[in-house]
Amino acid sequence: MANSSSIPHFLLLPLPGTRQLQLLHFCLFLAIYLAALLGNGLIITTIASDHHLHTPMYFFLLNLALLDLGTISTTVPKSMANSLRNTRDISYSGCIAQVLFFLSFITAEVSLLTIMSYDRYIAICRPLRYETLLGSRVCDVSLQAEDGVTSSGMRYWALLHIANTFSLPLYQGNVVDQFFCEIPHILKLSCSTFNLRKIGLIVVTICPGFVCFVFIVVSYVQIFRAVLRIPSQQECHKAFATCLPHLAVVSLFLSTGFFAYLKPPSISSPSEDLVVSVLYSVVPPAVNPLIYSLRNQELKAALSK
């Protein structure tokens, strides 16, 4: 038995195979990371520099790009460094920092995706009130709210998850079967008598996501009902083209995230866990810029400038 405070470091998921496969993993993650940096960086620069894009929808998109950069920068660089150095180590404090920042960015991103679904609802179902409900003043308030969510989220997760997760006695050693410090895999190392405590931590972790998911579903039910009543086929197609990219991002992000935290240990395997974690922590930050820019003529025109 080992107390978590006495563990100097954790060991992340080992990459099977030869040194060549480890370097291939490094190159693959490097390509994804550079794509995320380039795509999100272009969106941030374009929206910030083009005054025609200073509208609520693009304001939310800019904040989403910032959160995507934070999310992928929390996990991927350490995994790349380990592959390049042929090691698995992550320090105890480094693991705590990963949990802190990753959950903070993820929580803020789920909240922002929920706000974006409300933005689409107002734009399609209440178009005449859009400027009143989501004008520049609302954007300023939303920016302050987003900063508040991020900062308060960091304090909340620090007090709740770090204090509880890392205070558990680790009977199963210090090997985390994941490429970053993920809470379900850290909880697997603890004693089986703490099942109730572990379940409580996971429930509290996913509760914000579940509430946001319900709000998003209700918003899109109203949106689809309004779109189906549009007489013009062209306007109907335009409305679907506006909503479907956001819905695709939310579906991938939340479904894989819920699966990662709620799946029973009996159906868990290292390869499956790795794929699921990549799908909700690495893929969305890299593909979000592509999804949103390809379906948006205004953003494409601004990028071309």
Image: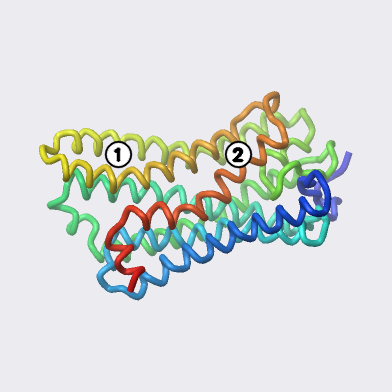
Residue drawn at x 17%, y 58% as measured from the top left: 132
Residue of label 1: 219
Q: Amino acid at mark 2?
A: Val
Q: Is residue 297 above or below residue 216?
A: below
Q: How is the image coloured?
A: rainbow
Q: Name which of mark 1 and mark 2 comes first in the sequence.
A: 1
Q: Secondary structure at mark 2?
A: helix
Residue drawn at x 50%, y 57% as measured from the top left: 68
Q: Is residue 205 above or below residue 289?
A: above
Q: Quadrant of the N terminus?
A: top right
Q: Nearer the viewer, residue 108 or 252?
A: 252
**Is residue 36 toward the left or the right of residue 180 in the image?**
left
Residue 304, image quadrant = bottom left
Q: Nearer the viewer, mark 1 or mark 2?
A: 2
Residue drawn at x 85%, y 41% as measured from the top left: 173
Tell which residue pokes out farthest to the front in this image.
20
Q: Is residue 16 above or below residue 67?
A: above
Tell which residue pokes out farthest to the left in this image.
231
Residue 223: % across, % down: 25, 39
Disc tally is 2
Q: Nearer the viewer, residue 282 or 264?
A: 282
